[in-house]
Image: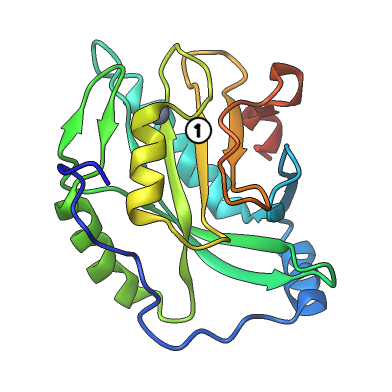
Amino acid sequence: MNKDQPHIQIQPRRPFVQQDLDELVSSAHAHNASEQWVYGNCQVERCFFYPEVVQDIDTWATNSLESTPVAETGGFLLGNYAMTPIDSYILAVQHFLPAEHISFQSSHRLRMGPASMLALDKAQLAYPDQLVLGWFHTHPGHTPFFSEIDLGTHEAFFKMPYHIGVVMDPCQETYPTAIFARREDKTMVTHWNPIEWIKWEDLRN
Ligand SMILES: [Zn+2]
């Protein structure tokens, strides 16, 4: 492990009871959640993004465009998961929590330090029925992919097989976005074929 990456793991704040698959899917449909498939044959098969998450991420990313130069920004994804009969994960992302106390932020780098993680740990208390499903950050003008720093962050803080990293480029008109997850062999997918990128603008109502 990189020595400037502290050894903190994001743990559920209570024993977590995994949701029934049918229940999770029907609840997501009832809430009009947007269903997105994960590229690259990963342990996470699909993600449902609840409308307030779509909106909150959209607003957070749009607000970041006001800084000059546009800095990377990020946050955390909370919700629930269920498992399919072939043991892949289906996520219901129900809440977006903007990151606080980021240790380093520029147009090309975002490093979530221990202070961000401790703030997250505290903030989780407000959502006792949800757990941390992963994180979100922007790549202003340099397309959605997982960089070496992103891999370091993911390996340091997001070790669970259901943990995802969502990356968006808000400097492109459609807000192209990709969801990164682990393959069966636990390695991360780091690039999506651009034709598979999610256009976040299509998820808006
Ligand atoms: Zn990145």
Residue 154 vertical placement versus 145 (above, below): below
Q: Amino acid at mark 1?
A: Val
- Residue at 31%, 64% (x, y): give it: 9
Q: Badge 1 local density, few (<14 within 10 Å), some, or many (20+)?
A: many
Question: In the rendered view, how is the structure colored?
Answer: rainbow
Picture residue at 40% right of the left edge, 46% below the top: 154
* Residue at figure coordinates x 50%, y 21% from the top left: 169
Which residue occupies the foreground of this view, 52 or 84? 84
| Residue 74: quadrant of the picture | top left
Question: Is residue 200 found left or right of 96 in the rendered image?
Answer: right
Q: Helix, strand or loop at disc 1?
A: strand
Please indicate whether residue 54 sits to the left or right of residue 198 in the image. left
**Location of residue 174 in the rendering, given as x and y in whole percent from the top left corner:** 62, 19
Q: Is residue 205 left or right of residue 17?
A: right
Q: Quadrant of residue 66?
A: top left
Q: Nearer the viewer, residue 167 or 58?
A: 167
* Residue 26 vertical position relative to residue 204 in the rendered view, above or below: below
* Residue 138 in view (yes/no): yes
Residue 54 image-quadrant placement: top right
Q: Which residue is mark 1?
A: 167
